[in-house]
Image (spheres, rainbow, N blue to C red):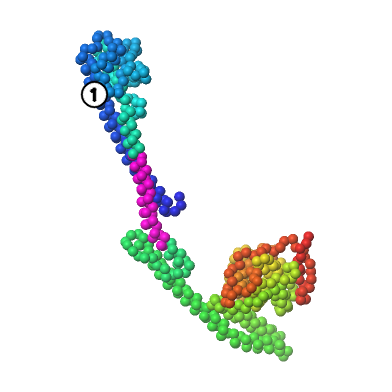
């Protein structure tokens, strides 16, 4: 049974049912025994009076037959016996009865065995049903055995009324106890509901939520414990937020302060690299190393500044209608990757949506650059256009990424293995790519298997109009899958080899 309320109500009802049942059963059996014992005593008293009067009247001759006995009893004691019936049993099992339903066999065997030749009466109760009796028997002097059947119908009817009343009262008590259980459960559950709502409010970030500390019961102790926990959590989260804000300011300030000297350093390194004719081999190597590392440092600073803008929640979006096929081609041309990457475009070579071209270009460049640096040829960019989404997938035939690294690829400063550090990456590229995708309401996902290459997919929602000013679109819920059953046809677009699919065989 689920829920505390049903269990409490069921417990109240079960306890009441057991208690009421035990009390009703005890009362019924006590009253029943008393009623039946009183009926037996009355029957014996009546039988003794009738038999004594019959014997004293001298109306029974010696050797009286059962018929004589019945006639004498009927004459003397008709009023005293009431509804009782008489069975007189003589020698040879001859009998006479005042009821056609009674005979010598109606007399219980145990009673007949105890009836002797004296004047003492014996009795037995044949049961508790409506057709049962108190049977009183005795041996008449010089005559047959006399058995008087006193019916118990009235007593049994009274006991049935008592039983029904007790049953109805017990059912009423169970119903009342269930209602009491509902009320008690409501009183018990109300503080628990308040605690549940308060816990949910804390969960969603409302750390100032507190419970009222009223009363002196266990729920008050719970409220005090909850409030102490909330106080400690608020202080801890406040400290962490302050620390995080300080860290973000530090990164932003350092990145900003480094930008100007790094620009000068990079320019000087480029000039030095272009004028190495007068340097020896060691000097030329040093000049090239200085140029490469200064560019790498400048790129890292730019990445850190971009991350700080994401953390501050102030990234600017310049929405334009973008054809992703042209965007991909332009990104490859701008970085001289046209001869190293194949582009697979949808039918018609158009996949348009509203996006920020600079940020979308940064995502595509990052994914393709990773494939060229860490994967293996052939590297292919697939552009797919569906009813609700457009996708850009970058596929390489490299060694793949181990499964244990896939869940962390988009973490900041994460590198799958030490060999990737040699490529000069900072570990921020994929994190920035995913942030840029989510600013569009899309995402970047990865599928990789060792020995079979890696596929990164940049998904954007398809839009017919840009979102409102300063509005971050909601996350993309469903993306249309790539159409199946397509056939490849090669054409040239902007001097880049583009594989265009069309519906076919």
| Quarter of the rendering containing residue 428 | bottom right
Q: In the depicted view, which residue is nearer to us: 313 or 434? A: 313
* Image point (75%, 69%), residue name: 348
| Quarter of the rendering containing residue 431 | bottom right
* Image point (30%, 37%), residue name: 27
Q: Is residue 435 left or right of residue 71?
A: right
Residue with the mark numbered 1? 45
| Quarter of the rendering containing residue 501 | bottom right
Q: Position of residue 10 (x, y in %)?
A: 40, 48
Work out which quarter of the rendered image holds the C terminus and state it: bottom right
Magenta stretch bounds: 166-195
Q: Secondary structure at mark 1?
A: helix
Q: In the rendered image, is residue 76 in sight? A: yes
* Image point (23%, 16%), residue name: 54
Q: Residues within 10 Å of mark 1 (few under 14, many from 20)?
A: few
Q: Is residue 213 left or right of residue 72?
A: right
Q: Is residue 311 magenta?
A: no
The majority secondary structure of the magenta stretch comes to helix
Note whether 129 is above or below 280 in the view shown.
above
Question: Which residue lies most toward the bottom here?
Answer: 278
Q: Position of residue 13 (x, y in %)?
A: 38, 47
Q: In the depicted view, which residue is nearer to us: 6 or 307? A: 6
* Image point (50%, 76%), residue name: 244
Q: Is residue 169 magenta?
A: yes
Q: In the depicted view, which residue is nearer to us: 356 or 80? A: 80
Q: In the depicted view, which residue is nearer to us: 449 or 467? A: 467
Q: Position of residue 176 (x, y in %)?
A: 36, 48
């Amino acid at each position: 049974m689920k829920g505390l309320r049903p269990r409490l109500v069921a417990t109240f009802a079960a306890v009441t049912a057991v208690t009421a049942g035990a009390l009703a059963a005890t009362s019924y059996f006590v009253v029943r025994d008393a009623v039946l014992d009183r009926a037996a005593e009355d029957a014996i008293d009546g039988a003794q009076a009738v038999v004594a009067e019959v014997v004293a009247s001298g109306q029974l001759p010696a050797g009286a037959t059962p018929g004589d006995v019945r006639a004498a009893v009927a004459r003397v004691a008709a009023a005293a016996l009431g509804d009782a019936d008489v069975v007189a049993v003589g020698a040879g099992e001859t009998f006479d009865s005042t009821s056609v339903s009674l005979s010598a066999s109606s007399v219980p065997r145990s009673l007949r065995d105890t009836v002797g030749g004296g004047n003492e009466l014996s009795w037995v109760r044949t049961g508790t049903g409506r057709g049962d009796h108190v049977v009183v028997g005795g041996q008449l002097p010089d005559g047959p055995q006399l058995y008087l059947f006193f019916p118990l119908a009235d007593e049994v009817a009274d006991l049935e009324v008592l039983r029904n009343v007790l049953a109805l009262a017990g059912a009423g008590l169970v119903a009342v106890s269930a209602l009491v259980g509902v009320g008690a459960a409501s009183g018990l559950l109300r503080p628990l509901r308040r605690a549940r709502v308060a816990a949910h409010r804390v969960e969603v970030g409302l750390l100032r939520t507190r419970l009222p500390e009223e009363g002196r019961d266990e729920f008050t102790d719970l409220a005090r414990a909850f409030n102490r926990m909330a106080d400690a959590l608020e202080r801890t989260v406040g400290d962490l937020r302050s620390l995080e804000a300080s860290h973000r300011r530090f990164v932003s300030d350092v990145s900003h302060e480094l930008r100007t000297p790094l620009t000068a350093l990079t320019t000087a390194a480029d000039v030095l690299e272009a004028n190495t004719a007068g340097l020896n081999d060691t000097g030329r190597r040093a000049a090239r190393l200085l140029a490469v590392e200064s560019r790498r440092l400048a790129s890292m600073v730019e990445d850190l500044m971009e991350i700080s803008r994401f953390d501050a929640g102030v990234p600017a979006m310049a929405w334009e209608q973008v054809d992703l096929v042209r965007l991909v081609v332009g990104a490859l041309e701008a970085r001289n990757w046209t001869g190293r990457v194949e582009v697979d475009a949808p039918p018609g070579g158009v996949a348009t949506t509203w996006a920020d071209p600079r940020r979308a270009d940064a995502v595509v460049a990052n994914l393709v650059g990773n494939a060229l640096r860490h994967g293996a040829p052939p590297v292919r960019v697939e552009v797919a256009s569906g009813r609700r989404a457009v996708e850009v997938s970058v596929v390489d035939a490299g060694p793949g990424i181990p499964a244990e690294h896939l869940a962390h690829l988009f973490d900041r400063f994460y590198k799958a293995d030490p060999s990737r550090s040699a490529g000069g990456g900072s570990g921020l590229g994929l994190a920035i790519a995913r942030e840029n995708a989510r600013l569009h309401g899309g995402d970047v996902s990865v599928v990789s298997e060792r020995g079979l290459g890696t596929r990164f997919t940049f998904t954007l929602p398809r839009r017919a109009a840009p979102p409102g000013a300063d509005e971050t679109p909601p996350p993309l819920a469903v993306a249309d899958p790539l159409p199946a059953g397509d056939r490849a046809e090669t054409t040239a677009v902007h001097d880049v080899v583009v594989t265009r699919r069309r519906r076919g065989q």
